[in-house]
Amino acid sequence: MCTYQKTLKTLFQLTVADLAVYAVLDTALQNVETFLEKHEKLRAHREMVGAIPKMLDYVSNRKKTVI
């Protein structure tokens, strides 16, 4: 099963917590690019949520926030 198929499978099981974790990881990666190097499950989670087409569209078109 490819990543996109896994994403479709989990899309209907996505929770607010999944989006919150994605947001926290995204913020952390803005400051420390190596943040997820040792955290395979968190990296996989971010990739899964980030592969959702509407999430890809949002992230690529949003304003960048300096933290």
Image (tube, rainbow, N blue to C red):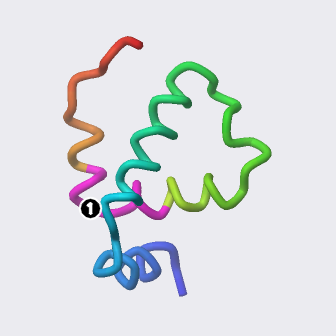
The image quadrant of residue 33 is top right
The image quadrant of residue 63 is top left
Tell me if mark 1 has few (under 14), some (14-19) or many (20+) residues whose alpha carbon lies within 10 angstroms of its own: few
Q: Magenta residues, as a range?
A: 48-56
Q: Is residue 32 above or below residue 25?
A: above
Q: Is residue 5 magenta?
A: no
Tell me where residue 49 appears, x and y as whole percent.
Answer: 41, 60
- Helix, strand or loop at label 1? It is helix
Q: Is residue 41 left or right of residue 5?
A: right
Residue denoted by label 1: 53
Tell me where residue 38 appears, x and y as whole percent.
Answer: 79, 45
Magenta stretch prevailing secondary structure: helix
Q: Residue at x 29, y 40 (%)?
A: 59
Q: Is residue 52 above or below residue 60?
A: below
Q: Is residue 55 above or below residue 26?
A: below
Q: Residue at x 51, y 40 (%)?
A: 25
Q: Residue at x 28, y 81 (%)?
A: 12
Question: Three-letter amino acid code at disc 1?
Answer: Pro
Furthest toward the right, the residue is 38
